[in-house]
Amino acid sequence: LMELRDGVPEPALLLAVARQESNFNTNAISHAGARGIMQLMPSTAEIYGVDTSSSVEEQIAAGVKFIKWLDRQLPETIDDPEERTKFILASYNVGIAHIYDGRRLAEKYGKDPNVWTDNVDYFILNKSNPKYYRDSVVRYGYARGQETYNFVKEILYRYEHYKKVLEN
C-alpha cells in the first residue's frame, strides 16, 4: 500500500477511508448493509471478529486486516505502490472479484491489467454497461462502477489533504 509502514496503511489513508465510508460514524449502515466506521459487510466483519458493538479501535483494526488481505489477493505484477493502492481501494469498495473482472477486460481490450489509472479503472467505471458486464471474460457480472471509480478518486484526494494536516 502507498506509504505502508510495518504492514499497516498510514494513518492519513485510514482516515480517508473512514471518512469516505462512514463520515466517522461508528453506527453507519450503508444501502448495501455495510456497517461501522470502516463499513465492513457483516460477513467480512464476522471474519475479523467485529460487529456494531465493537470499539472504534477494533473496527479500524478489522479494516486494516481486511486491507492487508486484499493486498495479498492482488498479483505481484501490480508492482507500482500507488497503482496497487488504487486497486486495493477499489477492491475494498466493490469487491475483489469485480477487480479481477476489470483486469481481465483490460487485458482483452489491450490495456494494462496492472495499472489502474486509464486502464483498469475504465472497465470498472463501465461495468454497469452490458457491453462489458456481459463480456465473456467477466465472471461476476454487473457492478456500480461509477461509485467505485469515484471512491478511489475521492479517497486519494482526501488522503493527500490529511497527509498534509498530519505532517504539521
Image: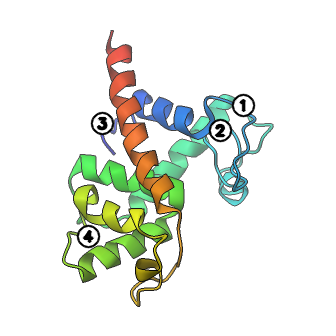
Distance of label 2 from label 4 (alpha carbons): 32 Å
**Which residue is under mark 2?**
59
**Which residue is under mark 4?**
113
Q: Of callouts 3 and 4, which one flags the residue occurring earlier in the amino acid sequence?
A: 3
Asked if the residues shown at circle 1 and circle 4 are in contact, with their CB atoms under 8 angstroms apart, the answer is: no
**Mark in front: 3 vs 4:** 4
Give the residue type at disc 4. Answer: Pro
Give the residue type at disc 1. Answer: Ser
Asked if the residues shown at circle 2 and circle 1 are in contact, with their CB atoms under 8 angstroms apart, the answer is: yes
Identify which residue is drawn at 54% across, 32% down. 19
Distance of label 1 from label 3 (alpha carbons): 25 Å
Distance of label 3 from label 4 (alpha carbons): 22 Å
Label 1 neighbourhood size at 10 Å, few (<14), some (14-19), many (20+)? Answer: some
Q: Where is residue 39 in the image (x, y as percent from the top left)?
A: 64, 45
- The quadrant of the picture occupied by the N terminus is top left
In this view, the residue farthest toward the right is 53
